[in-house]
Amino acid sequence: MINDESDLLKKIDETLKDIREKNALTHCITNSVTINDCANAVLAIGGSPFMAEDAEELEEVVTIADVLVINIGKLSKEQIESMHISSKTANKTNTPIILDPVGVGVTELRNKTTMDLINDYDITAIRGNITEIKAIAKLAGVLDESNTAKGVDVNIDDIITEENLKDNGELICELASKLNTTILASGPIDILSDGNLTVAIDNGDDMMPLITGSGCMLSSIVGSCIGGSNPFDGSLVAILAMNIAGERARAKVDEKDEGTGSFRTYLIDYLYKTDSETLTEKANIKIL
Ligand SMILES: Nc1ncnc2c1ncn2[C@@H]1O[C@H](COP(=O)(O)OP(=O)(O)O)[C@@H](O)[C@H]1O
Ligand SMILES: Cc1ncsc1CCOP(=O)(O)O
Ligand SMILES: [Mg+2]
């Protein structure tokens, strides 16, 4: 039973231990832009990445995997078919599915692919930037209007701030409840909800959106963390690990007068160095 923020902080140590012990085999069907970063992020947090998408091997892969991560960043007809084969098998084997709806709201193909996956399968968690989550809210009939994403990036009019936090929290909670899933909406402040408990996480660094793949990496480690624990606790540890790695990476690049290229490398370094003491100490979370 969670009464306040300290109850959530107390669970971090055990959840991280479970994640590392499980070393979840994290099957990713993802985009070729950030696929290598995702594999390294999964290894750094303590998972085991397995990128596979040819239809011929998918039933075997999903059967041995602990979790399936689907990222729609760079779709092809073959990849969409692979997403359906894998999701169908994952639901049969009770393997959790994490969906990163990259660029949903921007094209009809992304809208159709996202909503087909959501409507046809039990999706354990959805992780997207706030514009993508609002696009799904509109497609699911929870929101009347939504802004269009700037390609794969957030629309600046949607950015989560202290002022709109309550409204966004209510929307994400309602959407999670309607879709019977856990939702993690990201930005300067992130919101996590399973339809009952809704938490804002105010960590991270403004250099994170300046490298490609911070969202994709986050979704991949959400997969490994859920594969090693449960949807809410796993997602919370994943977002804290990612954002606190971002804070530490930024301090390092500033100290060394470096830029976004080094930041990308340090982000993986500090994901690898994730420890529960640092997460607990630096976590800035608020139950909404
Ligand atoms: N301005 C920001 N300040 C702090 N953290 C941020 C900022 N923008 C994004 N993040 C963090 O970067 C990661 C990726 O989020 P986001 O950029 O929203 O996803 P995407 O890359 O899918 O658009 C998340 O961990 C999020 O908390
Ligand atoms: C640039 C780009 N184009 C298609 S997928 C992709 C990567 C998106 O990564 P992220 O959402 O993590 O920034
Ligand atoms: Mg993204």
Image (cartoon, rainbow, N blue to C red):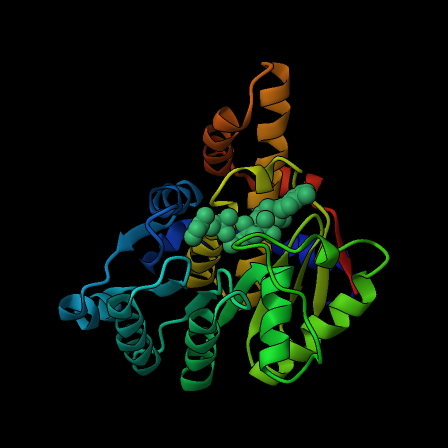
Task: Say which quadrant the C terminus sits in.
Answer: bottom right
Task: Out of 102 and 92, give the one closest to the viewer.
Answer: 102
- The location of residue 112, given as percent across then percent down, is 44, 77
Q: How many numbered discs, if any?
A: 0
Taking 51 as reference, is 176 above or below it? below
Quadrant location of residue 180?
A: bottom right
- The location of residue 239, given as percent across then percent down, is 58, 51
Task: Out of 157 and 212, give the one closest to the viewer.
Answer: 157
Decide if residue 238 is in sight here.
Answer: no
Task: Out of 99 and 115, give the one closest to the viewer.
Answer: 115
Quadrant location of residue 245?
A: top right
Task: Out of 192 and 22, give the one closest to the viewer.
Answer: 192
In the displayed orientation, state which residue is furthest to the right: 163
Taking 249 as reference, is 176 above or below it? below
Q: Tell me what residue is drawn at x 45 percent, y 66 percent.
A: 98
Q: Is 171 left or right of 72, judged from the image as shown?
A: right
Decide if residue 74 is in sight here.
Answer: yes
In the displayed orientation, state which residue is furthest to the left: 56
Q: Is 163 left or right of 236, judged from the image as shown?
A: right
- The location of residue 271, given as percent across then percent down, is 49, 38
Q: Tell me what residue is drawn at x 71 percent, y 68 percent.
A: 198
Quadrant location of residue 160?
A: bottom right
Q: Is 192 left or right of 214, judged from the image as shown?
A: right
Task: Say which quadrant the N terminus sits in.
Answer: bottom right
Q: Tell me what residue is drawn at x 60 percent, y 59 percent.
A: 149
- The location of residue 52, given as percent across then percent down, is 23, 59
Q: Tell me what residue is drawn at x 26 percent, y 76 percent.
A: 85
